[in-house]
Image: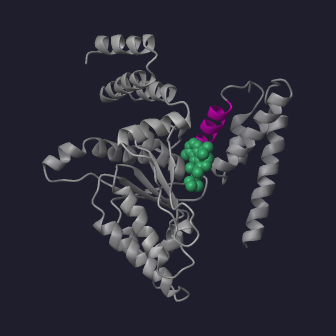
Amino acid sequence: MTTGELLVALFEAYRNQDDNAFMNVGMTLVKEEKEKNHYVLSNKLRKILLSSDERMEKTYTNRLNRTFDLPKDKDNGTDLLKVIYPRKTFDDLIISNEIKKQLDSIIKEYDKKEMLKAYGMVPKRKLLFCGPPGCGKTLCAEVVANTLDLPILYTCFDSLISSYLGETASNIRKVFDYASKNNWILFFDEFDAVGKSRDNIDETSELKRVVNSFLQILDGFECDSLIIAATNHEKSIDTALWRRFDEIILFDLPNCNQIKKFIKHKLRAFEVDNLNIEYFAKKLKDCSYADIERVCIASIKRCIMNGNEPINDKIFGEYVAKELKRAELIRKIGE
Ligand SMILES: Nc1ncnc2c1ncn2[C@@H]1O[C@H](COP(=O)(O)OP(=O)(O)O)[C@@H](O)[C@H]1O
Ligand SMILES: [Mg+2]
């Protein structure tokens, strides 16, 4: 359909109060803009259309032609997976040029997977995100999912490890089986729970079995979903596991420039004329984005509750000091 025809269809859907038709035409427009590489506009339109979880779920379930009947743990009946509808975009993410390049190439290959397949090639599909907590591994998975317009199937390894011997491998299989039925981002969080070195003498044979079955299933997993595993403890990951991934992305604590950019972004809707961001960025070195976000949110709350008072050095400084104290305490507990 031409853009003109789409607009006519959109207006007709409005006149007929046909919500489904409106959504379909809207999503076609979103797709067309994306195909023209207008990512920002396409994401903006998509965000407006899918502004609630119910809408998101409806759209995805309609498109996938099924409801999300998630697999459960046999022992305690809990869901092994949850579905996350991605909303974050590259605008929300601060990353190095190097990581941006890696992500762009993954997104491009995935987007052009049919073209690659015609030449007998497959896109990169198995990614490992490593680095300290609060530096954007989960956020990045969400941004990639949003850009590729895929829902996320999220699982935390803790929830896969069953109290019953043997059930864990079966849980992992259930997760992969479920994922194989559609295209998703299959996200394994806290992957280190299973990825610990198989040479470690303290390890139980159960954990070894889990690692082996995970490796086997990962190797044999041949569908169009993107698999992302994330870990805060890359050093404890066995080399056999590293080799299984097509791309490894190393996240790090933000540098001074990134901290400044992050603070400015978080406080963009508030008056900060009397805030020395440069000074505080230096103070906050060694903190993660999540730590710095806590400082920003505390300052924003205070500003709102005091009738939109500007965020100045005194207010921000108070929360920076609090955050540094907290970090010190956590360090001490960890020693
Ligand atoms: N690189 C980043 N750019 C922007 N915000 C970030 C970044 N990393 C973390 N954050 C903020 O911190 C929160 C927690 O980050 P998350 O992605 O869950 O960290 P991780 O998965 O590495 O532990 C995010 O929701 C986001 O608000
Ligand atoms: Mg995370």
| Residue 43 horizontal/vertical position (percent) | 45, 30
Number of marks: 0
Would you place residue 197 above or below residue 15 in this image? below
| Residue at the spot 44% in from the left edge and 46% down from the top edge | 67
Where in the figure is residue 84, as x and y percent of width and height? Answer: 51, 46
149 horizontally vs 204: left or right: left
- Residue at x 33% of width, y 45% of height: 105
Q: Can residue 91 be seen in the rendering of this structure?
A: no
Query: Is 248 a magenta residue?
Result: no
Q: Residue 283 or 145: which is nearer the viewer?
A: 145
Residue 308 occupies quadrant:
top right
Q: Residue furthest bottom?
A: 201
Whether 131 is drawn above or below 306: the answer is below
Residue 254 is inside the magenta segment: yes
Classify residue 33 by image quadrant.
top left
Q: Which residue shows up at 36% across the image and 38% down it?
A: 63
Left or right of 55: which side holds 306? right
Q: Which quadrant of the figure shows ligand 2?
A: bottom right
Which residues are the magenta region?
253-267
Q: Indicate the position of residue 107 as horizontal and vertical percent values.
A: 35, 43
